Amino acid sequence: MTQAFDVCIRGAGVVGQTLALLLARERLRVALVTPPRPAQTEPPALDVRAYALNNASQQLLDSLRCWPEGDAVTAVTGMQVLGDQGGEVVFSAREQNTPALTWIVDVPALEARLTEAVRYQPQIERVDSPRDAALTVVCEGRASRTREEFGVHYDTTPYPHTAIAARLQANQPHGQLAHQWFLPGQVMAFLPLGGDQGNSIALVWSVPHAEVAELMSLPPQEFADRVAAQAGWPAGSLSLSSERASWSLQQSRADRWVGAMPGQPPAGQVRSFALAGDAAHAVHPLAGQGLNLGLGDVEALARVLRERDYWRSVGDPKLLRRYERERKAGIWALGLASDGLQRLFDHTLPTVQNARNWGMNQFNRSGPLKSWVTRLAMGLA
Ligand SMILES: Cc1cc2nc3c(=O)[nH]c(=O)nc-3n(C[C@H](O)[C@H](O)[C@H](O)COP(=O)(O)OP(=O)(O)OC[C@H]3O[C@@H](n4cnc5c(N)ncnc54)[C@H](O)[C@@H]3O)c2cc1C
């Protein structure tokens, strides 16, 4: 009897749905596991976040016709990063000879595009429980249960911070500029939203756990004024336009990304698994790279499967090890860099404070180094 599916994807977040579409394009038959929502529950609250997506992610999603349109995407043409003692780094798209440093994408709009594309792809079947397939890909995010069942260790270092996300309305257009402040013990980012002429902002503010409850319960205008004060903007220049949501932050990575499925495979066949996206790694959102990395994972996995010899199964361990090798090292390096940055700005020693702000100014003047790092973050290097 022939197997109904080549690949079973567990988890239908942005990473899982993107992988399903990539594999369907290769004529593979995909089961996409989306557990049913318990009956009589409220519809899930809309995600208030906006993702900063780089050039590589933009091209990938565009090639699948899932890149959101209109005001759901804002091209960032300039970015200002400020330290806590006069340090400043300024990035400009013009300097890099590119239309955008990054794109800020409304999360519900992106999810809606993916869901729609999956619905009309006959190679993909949404199922409510895992199905037998030569390859199972776990895309269940950082709290994945399946990863544990498969015996993978997820090494996690919690940060003493929680990220608060919300939407803000400003009293003037954002001018396609993003801002980030490294404040003592906190990092705050303003991402421009609502299209190139918009005046909405997606806020991501990481603060010590102890401050979260108070910030989440402040009356809306007091919260907005508190944000404005931290940014050095006038009181009343911002208002809150969404619910607030929070995420405790962690750095994590799986000790292995691929392996044999537990249990006996049918005679003469292989049954393997691979991890992708946050199920394999989680980084601090200060670099805005988590989803970019996850999309890089699924692009690499789809390419490795596409380039396989015709007689190899998609569950062939040799192929999967190639995928693991290609992705693991780069992600480890990025995790180290964003972790180092987070720790550097968490320090309260005056000598460290001076050194980091001096370092920012040196970096700002560093020419080729700055250009290389910028292009790396843009997914161009
Ligand atoms: C505040 C904040 C801001 C961020 N900003 C950025 C940014 O600007 N740019 C960027 O690139 N990244 C950003 N990130 C990171 C980004 O959110 C994640 O990297 C991304 O959401 C990971 O996608 P995923 O599909 O791997 O996992 P998830 O988004 O967690 O999706 C996992 C899916 O699997 C489902 N699932 C879970 N368990 C099961 C199961 N047992 N069976 C079936 N399904 C299951 C879940 O319901 C969910 O639908 C940010 C993160 C935070 C917290």
Image (cartoon, rainbow, N blue to C red):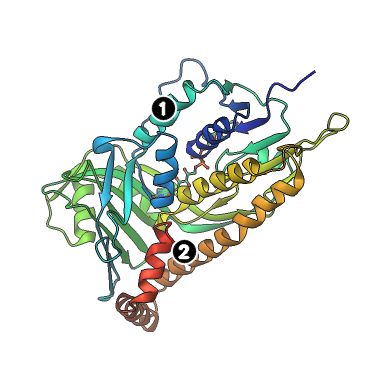
Q: Is residue 241 left or right of residue 281?
A: left
Residue bearing mark 2: 338
Q: Is residue 198 visible?
A: yes
**Of residues 103 and 251, the one drawn nearer to the viewer in this rendering:** 103
Q: Is residue 70 left or right of residue 302?
A: left
Q: Position of residue 3 (x, y in %)?
A: 74, 23
Q: Is residue 152 visible?
A: no
Using the image, determine if residue 198 lies above or below residue 188: above
Vertical relation: 119 (above or below) 279 = above
Residue at horizontal 13 percent and vertical 48 percent from the top: 173
Which SS class for mark 2?
A: helix
Q: Residue furthest bottom?
A: 351
Identified by mark 2, the residue type is: Ser
Upstream in sequence: badge 1 or badge 2: 1
Please give the label number shown on residue 9: none
Residue at the spot of label 1:
44
**Type of residue at label 1?**
Pro
Q: Dot 1 surroundings within 10 Å: few (below 14), some, or many (20 or more)? A: few
Confirm if mark 1 falls within 8 A of ligand 1: no
Q: CA distance from mark 1 to mark 2?
A: 31 Å
On the rendered structure, is 263 left or right of 344? right
Image x and y of residue 330, in percent: 56, 61
In this rendered view, identify the residue nearer to me: 179 or 302. Answer: 302
Q: Quadrant of residue 185?
A: bottom left
